[in-house]
Image (cartoon, grey):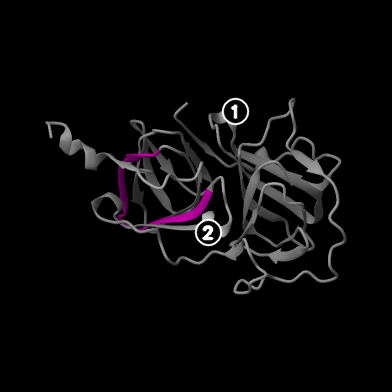
């Protein structure tokens, strides 16, 4: 399977396998997994009800979370933080952590995991245990402090370098990367300005796009899709795709890539290669 196009639906929320006795008020809706064609990714939207919690656990995979709505308290090792909308955190492989919602509204977050978590029925890669008591008060992170590693708040600054005819009006803000501590995936935000386009290209890695706002046309392997908030697209290795923004506001999305990009030749812009069609 080269690609998948779907839509996040509230009806997709369910208690994940193995969490029935280990969590309260916790549900997850799958966006991509092996059943939808992916080899490297497990991504979804998670929801935790007020006063809900997830028992201390660790995973044999790396996980990144990006808070969409509400507030969430994360205890990661010995540190505890209160996260709000547009905050994000990395949970390295094998790191004990627990989650709770002490607020009055449900919290929702985008979650990415790599290597891809194992499905039910075989060897399981989530292990529950204990990490001590929560502190009496859980504060928001000091994003400028040295103690707030592998945690941040999204701000649209320092887009990835690029431009030219292939990337008209496109800005990509990568915030979960090697320097941040991620080893198996990248997480970023993208924005395509009004009238913006991205020409046909492909990659030697998988990509996932979760639409946040605005609209775009996305062409994938000869088919055109009209994307709006809540839509999700996964493109596999070598899947040809392009974008063309539509509507009166920029198109914005969360994007993940796995494995991480190679140091060179991570993108093949078709326009760069077509000049050789008649010889070289």
Q: Position of residue 31 (x, y in %)?
A: 58, 39
Reply yes or no: does residue 199 show up in magenta: yes
Q: Is residue 168 visible?
A: yes
Image quadrant of residue 68?
A: bottom right
Horizontal and vertical percent position of residue 165: 24, 52
Q: Report the residue at 16% width, 38% height from top.
A: 275
Q: Residue 273 or 220: which is nearer the viewer?
A: 273
**For residue 93: magenta?**
no
| Mark 1 secondary-structure assignment | helix
- Can you give x and y, in whole percent of width and height, for residue 233 in the image? 48, 40
The first of marks 2 and 1 along the sequence is 1
Q: Quadrant of the C terminus?
A: top left
- Using a 10 Å C-alpha cutoff, classify the residue at mark 2 as few (fewer than 14 neighbours), some (14 to 19) or many (20 or more): few
The residue that disc 1 covers is 35
Residue at 45% of width from left, 45% of height from top? 261
Q: Along the horizontal axis of the image, is 100 left or right of 258? A: right
Q: Which one is nearer the viewer's eye here, 194 or 276?
A: 276
What residue is disc 2 on? 179
On the picture, is 24 further left or further right than 215? right
- Residue 269's place in the image compared with 150, above or below, is above
Residue that appears at 65% across and 64% down: 84
- Taking the spot 75% from the left edge, 25% from the top edge, the residue there is 121
- The magenta-colored residue range is 186-203
Nearest to viewer (mark 2 / mark 1): 2
């Amino acid at each position: 399977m080269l690609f998948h196009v779907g839509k996040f639906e509230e009806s997709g929320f369910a208690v994940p396998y193995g969490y029935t006795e280990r969590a309260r008020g916790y549900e997850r809706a799958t966006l991509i997994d092996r059943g939808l064609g992916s080899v490297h990714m497990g991504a979804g939207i998670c929801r935790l009800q007020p006063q809900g919690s997830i028992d201390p656990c660790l995973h044999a995979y790396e996980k990144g979370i990006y808070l969409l709505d509400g507030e969430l308290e994360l205890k990661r090792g010995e540190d505890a933080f209160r996260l709000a909308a547009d905050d994000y955190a990395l949970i390295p492989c094998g790191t004990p952590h627990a989650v709770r919602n002490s607020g009055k509204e449900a919290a929702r977050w985008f979650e990415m995991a790599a290597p891809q978590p194992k499905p039910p029925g075989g060897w399981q890669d989530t292990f529950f245990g204990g990490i001590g008591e929560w502190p009496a008060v859980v504060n928001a992170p000091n994003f400028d402090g040295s103690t707030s590693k592998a945690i941040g708040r999204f701000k649209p600054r320092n887009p990835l370098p690029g431009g030219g005819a292939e990337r008209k009006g496109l800005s990509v803000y990568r915030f979960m990367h090697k320097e941040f501590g991620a080893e198996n995936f990248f997480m970023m935000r993208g924005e395509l300005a009004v009238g913006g386009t991205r020409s046909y290209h492909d990659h030697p890695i998988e990509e996932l796009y979760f639409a946040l706002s605005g609209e775009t046309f996305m062409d994938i392997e000869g088919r055109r899709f009209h994307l709006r908030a809540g839509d999700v697209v996964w493109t596999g290795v070598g899947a040809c795709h392009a974008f063309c923004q539509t509507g009166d506001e920029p198109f914005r999305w969360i994007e993940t890539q796995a494995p991480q990009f190679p140091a060179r030749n991570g993108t093949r812009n078709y326009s760069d290669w077509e000049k050789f069609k008649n010889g070289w």
